[in-house]
Image: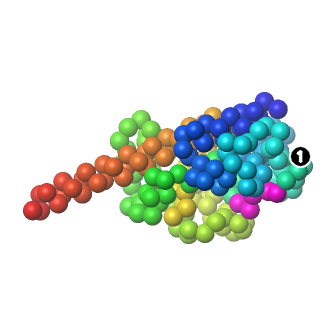
Amino acid sequence: EALKIKLEQAHRILFMEGMAEDTTRGHITAKAADGTIYIKPWGMGFEEVRAGDLLGVDGDGKLRDGTGRLHSELILHLEIYRRRADVFSIAHVHPFHAVLLSAQFPGELHIVSQQGFHFGDGVPVYASPDMIRTREQATELAALLADGPVVLMRNHGFVTAGKTVAEATILAIDFEKAAKEHLTISLYEKAAVMDREQ
């Protein structure tokens, strides 16, 4: 129950931070000590999530706790958990600046402030804009994430992986801020180049 409450709070925090694009899209999961993975039902807004609404599935995605429709991208979470024994929470969101960055990412993130330091070892990019609905897609994404904290998804959003719900949530907030900083300083750099060329 404590884990479910933390997951409820994480949804609320990301909603308040403007990270839930249309509130129903995106999802955060948490893995309990017994291996049960909790996720909000399909179509439920981040601001609506309550601990009692969360659905519990096993490592194969079979519903074990609760009633409701599961997200079609649940497989994304399952494959990361399968690959990463150190991960106990995953966030997948589509905030404005990160989506813009994903469409034009040059391969290296400008580290401007503390928010970007988590991602200084590089940001891998999942090249397809498609939703992750097959195990093959999810396996590819999990391999790109490898042992890192984030993977950017082209024209889609990003995924963060943490040891706790708090870590996955903070990484998501920080990556969106880092994306905004990258885009902003890139504009200044481009303007400076244009000034020199005139």
Q: Residue 114 appears at what percent x and percent y?
A: 41, 35
Relative image position of residue 29 (x, y in whole percent): 71, 46
Q: Residue 58: percent from the left, percent from the top?
A: 84, 51
Task: Check the image and name the residue furthest to the left.
Answer: 198
Q: Which quadrant does the C terminus fall into?
A: bottom left
- Using a 10 Å C-alpha cutoff, classify the residue at mark 1 as few (fewer than 14 neighbours), some (14 to 19) or many (20 or more): some
- Which contiguous range is marked in magenta? 69-74
Camera-side residue of 194 and 37 = 194
Whether residue 93 is visible here, answered yes or no, is: no
The colour scheme used here is rainbow
Query: What secondary structure predominates along the stretch shown in magenta?
Result: loop
Q: Residue at x 56, y 69 (%)?
A: 128
Q: What residue lies at 69% left-to-right and 69% top-to-bottom?
A: 136
**Tag 1's secondary structure?**
strand
Drawn side of residue 96 relative to residue 65, left or right: left
Q: Is residue 114 visible?
A: yes
Residue at the far top in the pictured view = 2
Locate residue 43: give its quadrant: bottom right
Amino acid found under the numbered disc labelled 1: Asp
